[in-house]
Image: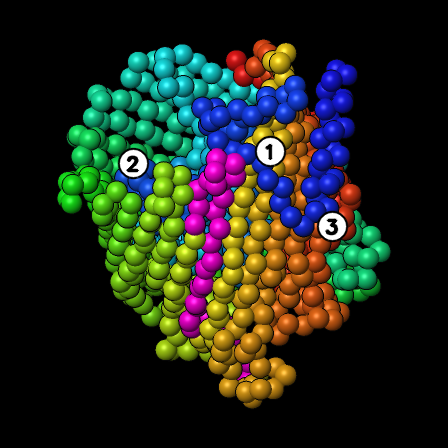
Amino acid sequence: MRRAIYSTVLCLCGIHAFAQSDSLPSFTSSPDTLPKYTIRYLEIKVAVLDETGNLPAVDGVRIYGGKKTAFVTPEKLNIDLSSNNSRQLFGRIPGIMVWESDGSGIQTGIATRGLSPNRSWEFNMRQNGYDISSDVFGYPEAYYTPPADAVMRIEVLRGASSLQYGPQFGGMINYVFDTAPATNGSETKIRQTFGSYGLFNNFISTGVRKDKFSFYSFYHRRSADGWRENSAYSTQTGFISMGYDFNKHVKLKAEYTHSTMMSQQPGGLTDAQFQQNAQQSYRARNWMHIPWNMMNVQLDIVSSEKFQLELKTFGLLATRGSVGFLDPITTVDNVLSTTNDYAVRRVDSDRYQNIGTELRGKYVFKLFGNEQTLAFGARAYQAKTFRHQKGNGTTGFDYNMELDSLGYKVNYVFGTKNYALFAEQALYVGKRLLFVPGVRFEQITANGSGTVNYNSGAIPMQERTVSKVLAGVGAEFHLNEKNEVYANVSQAFRPMTFSEVVPSATTDVIDPNLKDSESLNIDLGVRGSWKNYVSYDVSVYQMNIQDRIGTYTQSSIRYVTNIGSSLSKGIEMYVEGNLIQTHHSGRIISVHPFASIAYNEAVYTSWNDPTIAAGSSSDRTNNMVENAPRRIQRYGLTCKLNRFTATYQLNKVSDAFADALNTVTPNAAATTGLIPAYQVSDLSFAYNGKERYTLQMGVNNLFNESYFTRRAGGYPGPGLLPANGRTYFFTFGIQI
């Protein structure tokens, strides 16, 4: 115990020095087979950790060569898994912008390179390789986030993912769950977490393998009162997967996920209210309820080492229900003098029905003296959204979706159909050069009809079909066995969502020539390890987005059109090292630092609003893109003495604007204005026992920084939404 305490003191001293330094210390990182160096009585050797890394050039039926990729292994990060803390989960992925407005961790809001973090809708969000968002093309918001306790690996693929996974600008994120044991037997994991403000997190998983049969399931439950007033929540997720290996060539797997969430929404604050007390809330009657059901059946066929097929058929049945008082925060929600009762609340409800299938294959052949890999596939997808909004609800405080006799004011049914073909070729030339050309054909058909107020007749939407051919090429040049230069140029596009083409009022005008937004993503970088001391990935990028969709108002009429274009460019850098010092007595001390740094310059290059004169103060040309901080810096340090581990992470994010006008002074409702820079620290400790048990405790927001990352114009605000202050957690885990 004395040694553990002494080690902790030394570790924290090093952490403090590291956090205050602008330069990254040099530490070593390589396999155990590397030479050893002696410093006094300590033996030092280098080793690579597997918490994070890059995806391989070819992985099964997928090609990642020549692309900007990364993965993280949450269980090995020594972070707070119980609350799905995104700044910690994605801390080692440079450039990930996090909206920390949801303290429950139920809905993840992340983006990169100047895109919107709104429910991660700029990413193609997947679980075990299939879609999890509400409607990938019509309404691509991710209301469901897999519990971090269950996630074995998070895979991140940037904008070049458009060829394999679809047209989203941000790329693809895939949450990969744990599986059954590789050999006959069973394994059970239990994690119990207790924390501040009534946090209780329970996770239990069981995996069984018996000859050709495999089974894996987990149950997760989390609830808390919330750091802010009126922010209580509860969530439950259940998952079951069963597989059968007919023989070494054919395998079948089926899985089902059910998740349900009930969350009280505390609403926004004005800047003055935030300065007075960030934990207060002026909305006690706002609620959201989300049941989510997903199914997937997967068939794997491996006829030989040269040919492989993977067929996934997946579906989604889900709803989103919300009730609340959504007026600006400047409007007080209190008893009406005329009725001695509260005002009626707004009720909104969505229902999602999706089904899709993806076929992926791989064919390996020999050319130029090398084995070459062709990856190909096809996709068919259909989604339908039933949207009901602006109903007059009850005057109460609980979650209640009852309506008055008029029902919903807005009623829509919107559908999308998608067909796609894609192929990429990993072409090796010589022993060092790899080319990866690719192409994707995408066809999307959208249609819908409905009403926008009680008295209007039905407004049919003209069926619209868009066909796109996307192309790209990547390359890798291997400088040696451990270092490579990579580059990629890929096209992407973002189809119009139904929220953009459906009028919100009968006076709205939708541009009949409205076009999909298009982008060109460029990456150039170098990655690997330097002299077996440091592993790294440093790259520059550029993303051009043309025909961004937006609105302007003229003569009380709201026009929806292609409002402008933007350019994002910058640098993303990740560096990590691991120094292992072995005492003669056999005790091990390791010091493992990392730095994840991104600089992004995202500006509007044009703004096509006829109501604004070029060069006027309202012209957005050359303005910074909203919600796009220039600098996102994350530094971390892990110190280990035998079974005892301490981890510190520092997050530094520069300021950003909440609107395209780059408003600095907040308006009265706090929906526009500057989002100030902030820095927040997290600290955690863990002890791994001999009998396969783990004890963990930590502090999130160690120095109780008061900050916010978002100003909301509508749900769940409006107003600025504070991030959580200091919280504590304690976790006990056991593996049987």
Marker disc for residue 60 = 2
Q: Residue 592 carries which label?
A: 1
Task: Tell me the mark number nearer the camera, choosing from 3 and 1.
Answer: 1
Mark 1 residue type: His
Work out how far the residue at label 3 is from the one at label 1, CA to CA, in angstroms.
45 Å
Q: Which of 523 and 192 is in front in this view?
A: 523
Residue assigned mark 3: 284
Q: Does the magenta stretch include residue 530?
A: yes
Span colored in magenta: 526-555
Q: Quick one: label 3 or label 1, which is nearer the N terminus?
A: 3
Q: In this view, does 54 lie to the left or right of 631?
A: left
Residue 318 placement, left or right of 184: right
| Identity, as a three-letter code, of the amino acid under mark 3 | Ala
In the picture as drawn, the residue positioned furthest to the bottom comes out as 613
The quarter of the picture where residue 225 lies is top right
Q: Which amino acid, by three-letter code, is at mark 2? A: Gly
- Residue under the image location 42 percent in, 73 percent down: 547
Badge 2 local density, few (<14 within 10 Å), some, or many (20+)?
some
Q: Nearer the viewer, mark 3 or mark 2?
A: 2
Exactly how many numbered labels are in the figure?
A: 3
| Residue at image point 54% right, 70% down | 603
